Amino acid sequence: MKVHFFGTSAAVPTLRRGLPAVGFEREGELLLFDCGEGTQMALQRSPTKASRLAGVFISHMHGDHVMGLPGLLMSLQMASRTEPLVLAGTPGLQEFVTTNLRLVHVRLGYDLEFIEIREPSVVYRSEEYEVVADRLDHRVIALGFALSEYDRPGRFDLEAAEALGIPKGPLYGKLQRGEAVSLPDGRGIEPGQVVGEPRKGRKVAYVADTRPCEGSVRLAENADLLIHESTFEAGREEEAHAKGHSTVGDAVEIAKRGAARALALTHISSRYESVEPLVRQVKRQFSPSWIAEDGMVIELDREGDVLSVTGGRRRGARAGDPASAVVTGE
Ligand SMILES: [Zn+2]
């Protein structure tokens, strides 16, 4: 699974940071979380493709998180998209999108499936994972999201199966699916004799604009990667909370309370020409961690471990040691 950072700024874009947008890509399918202005250009510069988009999830109806959506939808139309697209978010999203498209005389050749989210809930399901939304604490109704894969069946132990004399064929499939079977000679075999423990699905969480809150902790819980807003540096909690935001210190605390395994901070105030102080703060307190950059891609392996961190303007990273990757704002 790859996490693409398309835009990592807060409120206003800078020459180095676009407005908020993060993509989760797995098995050739892309889910977009927030869609700030300019997201479609960032998508074009990225190694993934807009044609892989299956859904867009909007954390809240503030312009910096949603203004990129009408343009992106129009470009998908120009690319002759026909597959439906899920648009999930807080109340107002549907009206925003349909009004925009109507006023500029756009008729899409594909369907939009709007999901208006009012309560913490599962908002999207595929065969292999679900996306849950939970309540954040911002100045307007705001949501965070987590993609959780379902656990996969354990590994089938061929040697054990052969040693037990289980004939190859449909019995293997039944055991793999967790069913007990009877052999032709009358012996019964339990799945646990040949199938290992279920393999845990991965979890990646996206916590957008918020003060520290319990919803963030629930989303962070056992996440392999937590993406958390960090508008300000640690020490500026009063200002951050008054504006409905978090600091580096807040994000670290949420990651620790949720026992997240890796932490990437995004939604960085445009006041930081250099993010070195933020990098130092987060590195001291949480490992592995990164201050995200536009164009950065974090790849997780099947076990949810960070496999690589590429893109952005990373410095100081040693191959094979993602924990050492230092992201600088210079
Ligand atoms: Zn924001």
Image (cartoon, helix red, strand yellow):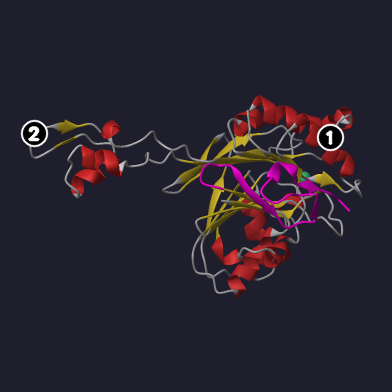
238 falls in the magenta region = no
Determine the residue located farthest toward the left in the rendered image: 185
Between 96 and 152, the one nearer to me in the picture:
152
Q: Is residue 102 above or below residue 315?
A: below
Q: Secondary structure at mark 2?
A: loop
User: Mark 2 near ligand 1 (CB under 8 Å)?
Assistant: no
Q: Residue visible at 79% across and 36% down? A: 283
Asked which quadrant contains residue 295, the reply is bottom right
Q: Residue visible at 84% across and 33% down? A: 240
Q: Main secondary structure of the magenta part?
A: loop
Query: Does residue 307 appear in the picture of this structure?
Result: yes
Q: Residue visible at 56% across and 51% down? A: 1
Q: Which residue is mark 1?
A: 281
Residue 159 picture location, percent across and down = 28, 42
Q: Can you tell which mark lies on residue 186?
A: 2
Q: Amino acid at mark 1?
A: Gln
Q: Secondary structure at mark 1?
A: helix
305 falls in the magenta region = yes
Q: Is residue 256 above or below residue 48?
A: above
Between 265 and 113, the one nearer to me in the picture:
265
Q: Determine crowd level at label 2: few under 14, some 14-19, many 20+ residues with C-alpha closer than 10 A.
A: few
Left or right: residue 142 versus residue 11 is left
Asked which quadrant contains residue 222, the reply is top right
Segment tinted magenta in the rendering: 301-330
Asked which quadrant contains residue 287, the reply is top right
Query: Which quarter of the rendered image does ligand 1 occupy?
Result: top right
Between 183 and 57, the one nearer to me in the picture:
183
Left or right: residue 158 versus residue 167 is right
Q: Determine crowd level at label 1: few under 14, some 14-19, many 20+ residues with C-alpha closer than 10 A.
A: some
Mark whose residue sits in front, 2 or 1: 2
Residue 163 picture location, percent across and down = 22, 39
